[in-house]
Image (tube, rainbow, N blue to C red):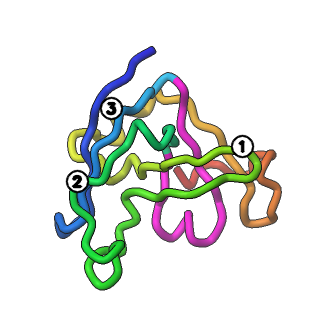
Amino acid sequence: MSIKTDQAGCHRGKARSQVELDWVAGSGNCNGSIHTKTRLWGVSVKPQAGRLLAIPHRYRGHCRGRCLGQGHLNVLGADVVTVNAACLDDARVEALSWVPARYADGRRDHWHYAPAQTAHR
């Protein structure tokens, strides 16, 4: 495994998080409208692998960057933390091009299937 501790933050620096990411485990892209518009390139981790360093009012009024999300995914039957790789402080997209990606067709609610077009990453 290639677990690395990274920090992520919004463009204004108001929201900060620190996570332990296993890049070999892969990442996810979805073509759903909110994910496409916010350019979400998600890396999911177990909740204990991520911690918030600074989070003003749960991002309201301060950050629209969506650098970190928390929730329960019924399809996995587990709580997860998802980090937007685009918001990592030290990670350049070019350097992470080798990371395996899973694609989901969220636009059509076909979560277990890749869309025909995956160039949106």
Q: Quadrant of the N terminus?
A: top left
Question: What secondary structure is marked by label 3?
Answer: helix
**Residue nearest the viewer, comparing 10 with 96:** 10
Residue 48: quadrant of the picture: top left
The percent coordinates of residue 99 (x first, y second) are 48, 29
Magenta stretch: includes residue 93: no
Instruction: Give the distance between the C-alpha atoms of the residues marked 2 and 1, in whole angstroms.
Output: 26 Å
Find out whether the residues at labels 2 and 1 contact each other: C-beta distance under 8 Å.
Answer: no
Circle 3 residues within 10 Å: few <14, some 14–19, many ≥20 = few
Element at label 1: loop
Amino acid under disc 1:
Leu
| Secondary element at image label 2 | strand
- Residue 95 is marked as 3
Q: Residue at x 39, y 46 (%)?
A: 85
Q: How crowded is mark 1: few (under 14 residues within 10 Å), some or many (20 or more)?
A: few
Report the label total: 3
Q: Give the range drawn in magenta.
A: 25-42
- Residue marked by disc 1: 76
**Of callouts 1 and 3, the N-terminal one:** 1
Numbered label attached to residue 53: 2
Please, what is the three-letter code of the amino acid marked with disc 3? Answer: Ala
Up the image or down, 64 lies above or below 9; here it is: below
Pick the front one: 97 or 29: 29
Three-letter code, disc 2: Leu
| Residue 10 drawn above or below residue 33 | above
User: Looking at the picture, how far across and down is residue 47, in whole percent?
Assistant: 47, 43
Q: Is residue 33 magenta?
A: yes
Q: Residue at x 40, y 36 (%)?
A: 49
